[in-house]
Image (cartoon, grey):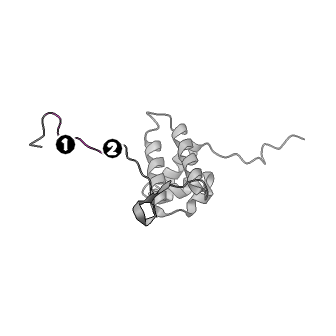
Amino acid sequence: MAPDPKRMKTSPNLSELAESSVAKHPNSDVEIALAFLAETVPDFCKESNDRLVKVGRNVKSLVSSKHVLPIESGLELQVEECKVLTQKEGLKVPKVRFGKTNLQMPIITLGCMRFQQRWGTTLTNM
């Protein structure tokens, strides 16, 4: 027997879900994130408000730029990042021994250890 199309639950695509989340909660980034993530990555809804604000702002920004750029790939990337962040294992900052104390310090590389103080003219007025 073929499945009954009326009984099959169809989930909206990510862009429709994002647009409806922004339309329901235009003034609350946290509520936008919760509405969007409740359907895509429910485990992420338990995260801190700081993370939810970032997700909500990102979703709102993508929806506002839908006339200029296709937003589906950006939303897929947002969902994948949230899935990675909800994993308990696998995300660890590498650490090394610091000095004689054997204190384990995280390695963070910004790629700019030295800035050149002068190279040509300097700004004197802004």
Please report whichever mark, 1 or 2, sits nearer to the chain's N-terminal start. 2
* Residue in view at x 48 percent, y 52 percent: 55
In the shown orientation, is residue 47 left or right of residue 109?
Answer: right
The spot of residue 33 in percent (x, y) is: 51, 55
Q: Residues within 10 Å of mark 1 (few under 14, many from 20)?
A: few
Q: Which residue is mark 1?
A: 117
Q: Residues within 10 Å of mark 2 (few under 14, many from 20)?
A: few
Q: Main secondary structure of the magenta part?
A: loop
Which one is nearer the viewer's eye here, 22 or 109?
109
The spot of residue 73 in percent (x, y) is: 54, 37
The spot of residue 48 in percent (x, y) is: 49, 63
Q: Residue furthest front?
A: 100
Which one is nearer the viewer's eye here, 10 or 45?
45
Mark carried by residue 63: none
The spot of residue 120 in percent (x, y) is: 15, 33
Q: Which residue is mark 2?
A: 112
Amino acid type indicated by mark 1? Gln
* Residue in view at x 41 percent, y 63 percent: 100
